[in-house]
Amino acid sequence: MGLSASQARLLSITARISDNELHSQQLANSKVRLADNTREASEEYLKALNAKKIRENQCHGDVGPKEN
């Protein structure tokens, strides 16, 4: 293999590595965004549950938890 062929092969391999690293970084960023969205949705869901419990207690005139 001549010098120019070796250089072309090196450039090709370097480009592929860079492309793989870019895709890896994009996947990592997507996972972070998904985790943030999941956390936000969970917080919103918990707030809604807590608000529902308060409304139910207020509708029945309860101040605290009921004893059985």
Image (cartoon, helix red, strand yellow):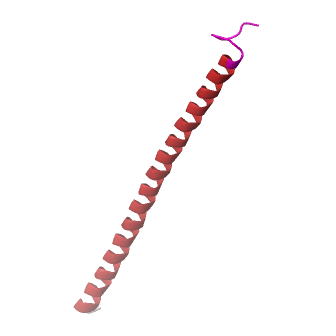
Provide residue 26's location: percent of width, then percent of height. 41, 62
What's the residue at 69%, 19% (across, down)? 59
- Quadrant of the rendered structure where residue 23 is? bottom left
- Residue lying at 45% horizontally and 52% vertically, measured from the top left: 33
Foreground pick, 60 / 39: 60
In the image, 46 versus 31, the foreground residue is 46
The furthest residue to the right: 68
Q: Quadrant of the C terminus?
A: top right
* Horizontal relation, residue 38 to residue 57: left or right: left
Residue farthest to the top?
67
Figure check: 52 above or below 62: below
Query: Is 42 on the left or on the right of 15, as rendered?
Result: right
Total marks in image: 0
Q: Write down the region rendered in magenta.
A: 59-68
**Quadrant holding the N terminus:** bottom left
The answer to if 57 sits in the magenta stretch is no
Residue 41 screen position, x and y as percent: 55, 42
Q: Is residue 66 above or below residue 28?
A: above
Residue 31 image point, x, y percent: 47, 53
Query: Residue drawn 39% across and 60% down?
Result: 25
Q: Nearer the viewer, residue 54 or 41?
A: 54
| Residue 45 falls in image quadrant | top right
Q: Main secondary structure of the magenta part?
A: loop
Q: Is residue 6 above or below residue 57?
A: below
